[in-house]
Image (cartoon, rainbow, N blue to C red):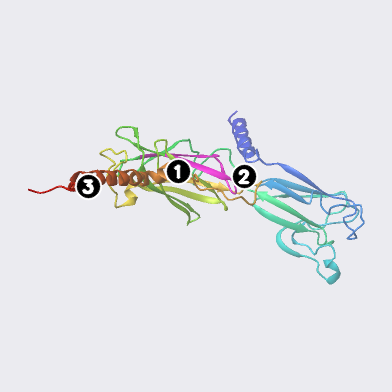
C-alpha cells in the first residue's frame, strides 16, 4: 500500500515538470534536397521559423526523398555551396543523417534564437526561437508571488509607501505604469505634496531617475523596458515639498539622509514574444498641476505685493498747493 502511494506521488511529481511542455512538428517537404528556384518545396523546413518555450520538444519529419540533418549553426544560403560554403555548425544540436520516413526530436532547455541547416544540403535553413516561460502572476526577484498593493515602511518608520504596476507581468517593449502613494502610519492619513525621487535599476545599472511631487491621489510613472532581467524600483528622499505642503509632525522638515526615507521593490522583466521594438512613451503626464505648485504662489503674491505698495505710496504722497490766477496776497 505504502509502495503504491509512493509510486503515485513520484509519478505526479515527475510529470509536474512537463505540464507546460508542448510538442511541435516540422516537416522537411518533398523537393528540399533541390537548391534550384523551381522546386516543389516552397520552404526547406515547414514551418521555416517556429516559436517554442523552454522544455518544449520539436520533432522533424523527413518527408523528402533524400536523407537530411538538423544541425544548429549557419547554412550557406541557396547558392553558397557553389563557392565551397557548406555551412558552419555551432555544436548546440545535431541530428546526424536521418532518412525519408524517419524523424528526429530535440528538447530545448535554453532560451534563445537557434538557426539550423542541413549539412548535406546546406542551402536548407530554419530558425527556432525558444522563449522563456512567463508566469501568469507578478513576483519579486526571488520568485515569490506578489499581491498588490505592495506595502513598505521607510527605515525611519515615518512613511508607508504602497506600489502597484499595470500590467502586472512586465514585458519588454510594453508600457508599464507604476502607481504609488505615501501615508502617515501613525494617523493612517494620505500624505500629499511630498517630494521624492524614483529610481529604477536593472541588471546592476540605473536606467531611470526622476524627481516628483505627489498629489492627494498619489503619483505614477510610465516606463518601457528594452531589456529583460531583474529590476529594483526605489523611491527615496520622501519629504515635505514646501511650506504649503500638507505636513504632519512625523514627516515635516527636510531629510538629509535620503536612505532614511527610501523603499525598494523588486520584480522581473520578461522578453516580449510579440514585440521587438517600442514607440516612445511619456515617462509621466505631459503636464502636471503640481509642477506649477510653487510657481502659482509667485504669480499670486507678486501682483498682490505690488498692488499694496502702490496703495501705500498713494496714501503717503503729499498734496500739492495750487494758486488761483489774479489772487493778491495781503
Q: Circle 2 is placed at which residue position? A: 133
Q: CA distance from mark 3 to mark 2?
A: 77 Å
Q: Residue furthest bottom?
A: 83
Q: Residue 169: within the magenta?
A: yes
- Badge 2 crowding class, 10 Å Cα cut-off, few under 14, some 14 to 19, many 20 or more, is some
- Of marks 1 and 3, the one in the foreground: 3
Residue 281 falls inside the magenta stretch: no
Residue for point 28% across, 37% down: 248
* 42 left or right of 306 in image: right
Would you say residue 90 is visible in this rendering?
yes
Q: Is residue 131 above or below residue 246?
A: below
Describe the element under mark 1 as helix, strand or loop. loop
Gap between marks 2 and 1 measured at Cα: 38 Å
> Mark 1 = which residue?
288
- Which is more toward the observer, 279 or 11? 279
Main secondary structure found in the magenta portion: strand
Name the quadrant of the N terminus: top right
Span colored in magenta: 160-180
Dot 3 alpha-carbon crowd within 10 angstroms: few under 14, some 14 to 19, many 20 or more? few
* Secondary structure beneath label 3: helix
State the count of labels.
3
First reached walking from the N terminus: tag 1 or tag 3 = 1
Q: Give the mark toward the camera: 2 or 1.
A: 1
Q: Position of residue 310 (x, y in %)?
A: 26, 46
Q: Which mark is residue 313?
A: 3
Look at the image and tell me whether residue 241 can be seen.
Answer: no
For marks 2 and 1 on the same chain, the one whose residue lies earlier in the sequence? 2
**Residue 44, position as x, y percentages in the image:** 83, 54
Amino acid at each position: 500500500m505504502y509502495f503504491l502511494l509512493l509510486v503515485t506521488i513520484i509519478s505526479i511529481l515527475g510529470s509536474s515538470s512537463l505540464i507546460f511542455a508542448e510538442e511541435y512538428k516540422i516537416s522537411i517537404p518533398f523537393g528540399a534536397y533541390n537548391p534550384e528556384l523551381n522546386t516543389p518545396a516552397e520552404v526547406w523546413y515547414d514551418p521555416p521559423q517556429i516559436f517554442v518555450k523552454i522544455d518544449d520538444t520539436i520533432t522533424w519529419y523527413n518527408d523528402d526523398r533524400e536523407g537530411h540533418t538538423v544541425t544548429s549553426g549557419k547554412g550557406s544560403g541557396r547558392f553558397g555551396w557553389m563557392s565551397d560554403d557548406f555551412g558552419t555548425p555551432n555544436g548546440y544540436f545535431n541530428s546526424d543523417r536521418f532518412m525519408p520516413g524517419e524523424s528526429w526530436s530535440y528538447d530545448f532547455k535554453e532560451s534563445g534564437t537557434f538557426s539550423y541547416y542541413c549539412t548535406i544540403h546546406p542551402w536548407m535553413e530554419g530558425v527556432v526561437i525558444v522563449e522563456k516561460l512567463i508566469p501568469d502572476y507578478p513576483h519579486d526577484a526571488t520568485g515569490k508571488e506578489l499581491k498588490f498593493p505592495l506595502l513598505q515602511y521607510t527605515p525611519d518608520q515615518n512613511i508607508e509607501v504602497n506600489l502597484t504596476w499595470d500590467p502586472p507581468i512586465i514585458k519588454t517593449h510594453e508600457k508599464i505604469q507604476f502607481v504609488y502613494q505615501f501615508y502617515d502610519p501613525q494617523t493612517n492619513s494620505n500624505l500629499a505634496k511630498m517630494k521624492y525621487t524614483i529610481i529604477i535599476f536593472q541588471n546592476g545599472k540605473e536606467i531611470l531617475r526622476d524627481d516628483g511631487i505627489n498629489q492627494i491621489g498619489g503619483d505614477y510613472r510610465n516606463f518601457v523596458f528594452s531589456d529583460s532581467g531583474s529590476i529594483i524600483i526605489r523611491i527615496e528622499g520622501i519629504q515635505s515639498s514646501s511650506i504649503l505642503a500638507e505636513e504632519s509632525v512625523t514627516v515635516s522638515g527636510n531629510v538629509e539622509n535620503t536612505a532614511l526615507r527610501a523603499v525598494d521593490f523588486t520584480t522581473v522583466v520578461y522578453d516580449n514574444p510579440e514585440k521587438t521594438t517600442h514607440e516612445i512613451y511619456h515617462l509621466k503626464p505631459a503636464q502636471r498641476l503640481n509642477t506649477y505648485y510653487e510657481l502659482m504662489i509667485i504669480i499670486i503674491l507678486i501682483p498682490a505685493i505690488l498692488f499694496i505698495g502702490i496703495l501705500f505710496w498713494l496714501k503717503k504722497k503729499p498734496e500739492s498747493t495750487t494758486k488761483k490766477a489774479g489772487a493778491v496776497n495781503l
